Image (cartoon, helix red, strand yellow):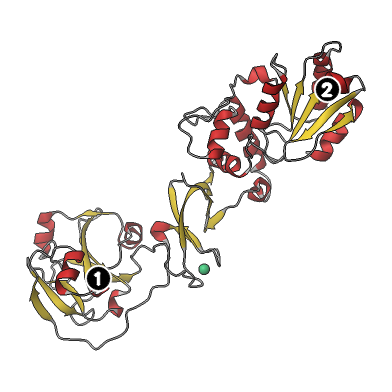
Amino acid sequence: MRFRELGIETQRQSPSNVRTEGFAFLVRAGYLTREGQPTCLGESALARLKELSQSDSFFAKLKIPTIKTGDETFFAISTGDVEILHCPVCNYAARHEVALFKKQALPAEPVLPLEKVLTPDCNTIESLANFLGVPKEKTAKALMFTRLADSKFVFVVVRGDMTLSQAKLKKHVGEVRPATADEIAKAGAAAGYASPMGLKDALIVVDDLIPQSANLVAGANEAGYHFKNTNYGRDYSAEIVADLVLAEAGDPCPECGKPMIAFDADLLADQTGYSFENILGALAEVHHDGKGLMFPSSVAPFDVYLMQLPGKELDTHAKAEEIYTTLQSAGISVLFDDRDERAGVKFNDADLIGCPLRVTVGEKNLANGMVELKRRVDAPSKSIKIEDVVKETKTII
Ligand SMILES: [Zn+2]
C-alpha cells in the first residue's frame, strides 16, 4: 500500500490525552485516532491479527505476557478495566470479585452465653467495634437484600473485617437488590442492628468462616442493642454456607498460600472470542522503544517500510517503484512511503509505524546498484544488492 492511500497523519508529539506509552504511539503513528478509533492503518493491523488468530499458539506469537483465569486471557495494564488478583509464585489468577483465597479461621474458643448489651449509635461495624472494644473480626456484619426472581428476603452474614462479594453471592442466590426499609421491618430485622436470629421468611446465607467463628457480636434486631457471644448453630443456622467474601491484595493464594497481588488488566480473550483492539493495545505497550512501535514480524500490518530519498542525479523514485512491485509480487506486504517529504520525516515515520524492516532507496547506494536494509529492532543497517532484496527480506521477516 502507498502511504498517500492510507490517509493517516503522524504526530511529532504525544496527544494530551495519552493514557500509556503504547497508546500514545498508536495515536502518533496513525493507527488510532485520539479517541481511540482505528484508522485505515489500524484496520490493517487488526485484520492481520484476526488472520493470525486462526493459527495455533496465537498469544505466543504476539510475544506479550498474558495472565489466564480459566477461560479468560488478560494483559496487565494500568488503564485496564478489570481488576485481577494474581499469585506471582504459582500463577493462580482470578477476577477480583470471584478470586478465592486461603481463609483463616480465628483461634477456637469456648462458646459463651448470649448477652444483650446497650450499644447506642453503633450502627456501623467501626462504631460498634470501637464502642465495645472488640476487633472487627469478632463482629458479624449483616447485609440485607431482596431476590429479584421471587422477592425472597435474603439475609447475609460475613465477618465484620470482611467485604461481601456481590458476584459470589449472586452465584448462590441469583440476582438481588438492596432490601427496602419496609422489607427489613417485615422480616423482623432492624437496620444497623440486624442479626439472623428470629427472622421470618428469610433466606439466611452465611460466609463459610461464620460457623468457625465463636462468640461474635451481632445485632439484636432492636435499635440500640447488640448481642455479645452469638454462635452459629446454637443461636441461628443458615440455608446456605459458602465463600461469600472478597479476597484482597496480600491475602494468601488459594493454591500455594503465598500473598497475592492486585492489578488492573484488559481482557484479551474469553470463550466468546478475542478483543482485537485490546490485543493491539497490548502489543503496542510491549513492543515499542523511544522512537515508536516495533511490531513482531508475525503481527506487523506490513512487512516492509519502503522509502526513497530524493536524488540529484539518479531517479530514486522510479527505482523504488520497481522494488515496490518486485517485493509485492514475491508476496511481501509493503508500505511504500512515496511522499515528497524530507528524509528526516520519512525516517521518523518509519520508526513510529514500526514495520519490522525498512528498505531505503538512496542515491549513494543506488549508484552502486544497492539499497539500504534496516531492521526496526536495534540492528545496524546494511547495504545489499538490489537483486537480493527479496531474498534478504524473506530471511528477516
Ligand atoms: Zn499461589
Question: Which amino acid does the dot numbered 1 rest on?
Answer: Lys
| Left or right of 114 on screen, residue 360 | right
Residue 327 quadrant: top right
Secondary structure category for the residue under label 1: helix
The residue beneath circle 1 is: 136
| Left or right of 297 on screen, residue 73 | left
Q: Report the quarter where the N terminus lies.
A: top right
Disc 2 crowd rating (10 Å Cα; few below 14, some 14-19, many 20+) is many
| Picture disc at residue 323 | 2
Q: Residue at x 83, y 36 (%)?
A: 394
Q: Position of residue 8 (x, y in %)?
A: 59, 21
Residue 239 quadrant: bottom left
Q: Residue at x 18, y 74 (%)?
A: 133
Instruction: Kindly report which numbered mark, 2 or 1, lies closer to the viewer in this rendering.
Output: 1
Q: Position of residue 162 (x, y in %)?
A: 30, 66
Q: Report the quarter where the C terminus lies.
A: top right
Q: Earlier in the sequence, mark 2 or mark 1?
A: 1
| Left or right of 6 on screen, residue 278 | left
Q: Residue at x 65, y 18 (%)?
A: 5
Question: Which amino acid does the dot numbered 2 rest on?
Answer: Ile
Q: Is mark 2 within 8 Å of ligand 1?
A: no
162 w.r.t. 263: above or below: below
Q: CA distance from mark 2 to mark 1?
A: 74 Å
